[in-house]
Amino acid sequence: MDKEALISELTFKAVRSSGSGGQNVNKVATKVVLYFDLEQTTIFSEADKERLQQFFKNRLNKQGVLVLDSDESRSQFRNKTLVTQRFLKLITEGLKEDKERKPTKVPKAVKRKRLETKRKRSEKKANRKKPDID
């Protein structure tokens, strides 16, 4: 995955933030919104697009665009950096292939130990009962 080519396909928009900043927040657009059109991208293969679509199924809008935003910082540049890092991390996570699970057997020693403790617990509870005198 070529990060530079991927970043070149991103669209950024600066909007007014609602975070900390006092009066500054009313006049400076520090919040950064990132848009990534997953359906129109040329970087990923169809299989990768399908995997990412499944990964982002709750985050994509109806047009197939991923929208992320950041208003953590009072600096527009810092917010752009943060949202880009978060985007790249999400893409990497979405493309990661799951490891195939190898089924394993429960060891005989574990089974034996479980049955032994079960038997001991049963004996302990049986010893609490009043003796049966007939």
Image (cartoon, rainbow, N blue to C red):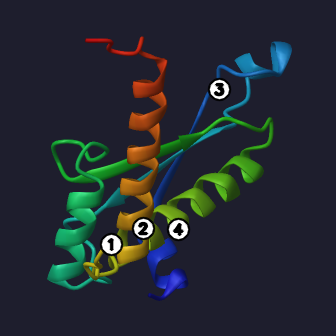
Indicate whether 15 appears above or below 26: below
Give how far apart the Cα atoms at labels 2 and 4 are: 44 Å
Residue designated by label 3: 17
Tell me, yes or no, if residue 61 can be seen here.
yes
Q: Which mark is residue 67?
A: none
- Amino acid type assigned to the residue bearing label 2 in the image: Val
Q: Residues within 10 Å of mark 1 (few under 14, many from 20)?
A: few
Tell me the quarter of the picture where residue 18 sits.
top right
Horizontal side, residue 78 vs residue 63: left or right: right
State the residue in front, 111 or 26: 111
Q: Quadrant of the C terminus?
A: top left
The reply to whether discs 1 and 2 touch (Cβ–Cβ < 8 Å) is yes
Tell me, yes or no, if residue 107 can be seen here.
no
User: Measuring 62% from the left and 62% from the top, which residue is drawn there?
Assistant: 85
Q: Depth-wise, is mark 2 or mark 4 nearer the camera? A: 2
Disc 2, SS: helix
Q: Quadrant of the N terminus?
A: bottom left
**If you read the primary sequence from the N terminus, does the residue marked by circle 2 or circle 3 appear first?**
3
**If you read the primary sequence from the N terminus, does the residue marked by circle 1 or circle 3 appear first?**
3
Instruction: Measuring from the top left, give residue 107's x and y in whole percent.
Output: 37, 76
Residue designated by label 2: 110
Give how far apart the Cα atoms at labels 2 and 3 are: 58 Å
Q: Residues within 10 Å of mark 4 (few under 14, many from 20)?
A: some
The reply to whether discs 2 and 3 touch (Cβ–Cβ < 8 Å) is no
Which residue lies most toward the front here? 134
Q: Which mark is residue 106?
A: 1
Residue designated by label 4: 88
User: Measuring 42% from the left and 11% from the top, which residue is drawn there?
Assistant: 130
Q: Residues within 10 Å of mark 3 (few under 14, many from 20)?
A: many
- Amino acid type assigned to the residue bearing label 3 in the image: Ser
